[in-house]
Image (cartoon, grey):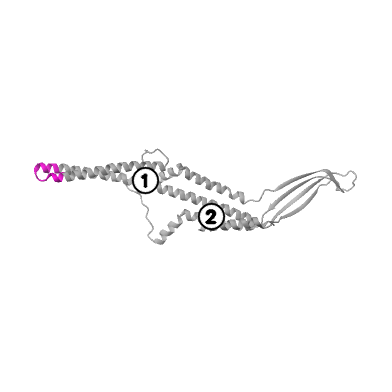
């Protein structure tokens, strides 16, 4: 019975998660953040260049007609990894935000479910008590007719019965409220029936305080989200420093050469493959990089405070 109760509640939690638009939005936000990881962790696209000599350059081997060039840029060592770490940690932070929203939703669903359960049980118990009082009332009437009881006893039972009728009406109204709230959390019709068990399934809390604290920490998604953001900003600061280092590019150039009709050289008209070409991008404008570093530091301070 306890296992059936847990499975029933788990089914309602699954419905609530699948039907909640806010939860879907946060999950898609996390998925979008994950797609950013491969974007920042790869090399920039190589550059291809084609040049055509309108006025060919005459050489010993023939006129140079065109050039083909391919160049690849390489950032400073560790920059791509740092940027990838930033994106990964930010994605993890968004995932913890999603998990926190899911936990809050599940808490509301469970609260509404248990309130509905207790109200339903209260209605059942109240009706049973009313039946018992009605039996007492009938016995009191018989005793009054026999002269073995006074009308005061019957009035006392009547008053208690009226109190229970008022309580029953209150419980029935509360049940409607809890039913509506529960179904709203599941994003379905307000008056759809809810299956409740005979007994509630219960988790046993850890006995040791330290174990309980560890459990609370491990399930505190807000704390985890802050930790991931801090890690992201630390990597962002490192990436900003590495971004201020020189960048290299390596390439090859291929020159297409035509034939020289006046040349007797055996290599006449052979194309020339020239390699490598090496370049360095020097980040001399430091103001931008200093601002990037300070930005990352301020973000770390803001997250800690």
**Residue 146, image x, y percentages:** 9, 43
Q: Residue at x 45, y 57 (%)?
A: 217
Q: CA distance from mark 2 to mark 1?
A: 35 Å
**Residue 275, image x, y percentages:** 77, 52
Is residue 199 within the magenta segment? no
Q: Is residue 290 visible?
A: yes
Q: Nearer the viewer, residue 96 or 168?
A: 168
Location of residue 224 with respect to 54 vertically, above or below: below
* 2 or 1: tag closer to the N-terminus: 1
**Residue 80, image x, y percentages:** 63, 54
Q: Residue at x 47, y 50 (%)?
A: 99
Location of residue 16 with respect to 287 vertically, above or below: above
**Residue 228, image x, y percentages:** 53, 55
Q: Nearer the viewer, residue 177 or 44?
A: 177
Is residue 142 within the magenta segment? yes
Q: Nearer the viewer, residue 72 or 235?
A: 235
Q: Nearer the viewer, residue 115 or 201?
A: 115
Q: Residue at x 76, y 53 (%)?
A: 276
Label 2 Cα neighbours within 10 Å, binned few <14 / some 14-19 / many ≥20:
many
Q: Residue at x 43, y 49 (%)?
A: 104
Q: Which mark is residue 265?
A: none
For the record, the magenta segment spans 140-154
Magenta stretch, main secondary structure class = helix
Q: Which mark is residue 229?
A: 2
Residue holding disc 1: 113
Q: Secondary structure at mark 1?
A: helix
In the displayed structure, does residue 195 sit left or right of residue 300?
A: left
């Amino acid at each position: 019975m306890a296992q059936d109760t847990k499975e029933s509640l788990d089914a309602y939690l699954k419905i609530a998660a699948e039907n909640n638009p806010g939860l879907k939005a946060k999950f898609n936000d996390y998925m979008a953040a994950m797609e950013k990881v491969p974007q920042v962790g790869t090399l920039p696209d190589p550059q291809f260049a084609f040049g055509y000599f309108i006025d060919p350059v005459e050489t010993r081997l023939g006129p140079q007609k065109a050039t083909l060039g391919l160049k690849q840029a390489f950032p400073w060592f560790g920059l791509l990894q740092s940027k990838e770490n930033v994106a990964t940690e930010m994605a993890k932070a968004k995932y913890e935000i999603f998990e926190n929203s899911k936990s809050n939703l599940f808490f509301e669903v469970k609260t509404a479910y248990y309130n509905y359960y207790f109200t339903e049980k209260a209605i059942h118990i109240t009706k049973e008590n009313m039946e018992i009082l009605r039996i007492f009332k009938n016995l009191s009437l018989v005793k009054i007719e026999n002269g073995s009881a006074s009308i005061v006893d019957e009035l006392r039972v009547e008053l208690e019965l009226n109190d229970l009728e008022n309580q029953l009406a209150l419980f029935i109204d509360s049940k409607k409220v809890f039913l509506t709230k529960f179904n709203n959390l599941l994003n379905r019709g307000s008056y759809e029936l809810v299956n409740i068990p005979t007994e509630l399934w219960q988790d046993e809390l850890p006995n040791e305080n330290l174990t309980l604290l560890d459990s609370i920490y491990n399930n505190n998604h807000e704390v985890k989200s802050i930790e991931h953001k801090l890690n992201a900003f630390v990597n962002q600061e490192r990436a900003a420093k590495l971004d201020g280092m020189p960048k290299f590019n390596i390439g090859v150039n291929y020159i297409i050469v035509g034939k020289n009709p006046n040349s007797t050289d055996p290599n006449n008209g052979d194309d020339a493959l020239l390699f490598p070409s090496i370049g360095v991008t020097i980040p001399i404008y430091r103001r931008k990089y200093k601002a990037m570093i300070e930005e990352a530091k301020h973000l770390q301070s803001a997250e800690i405070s």
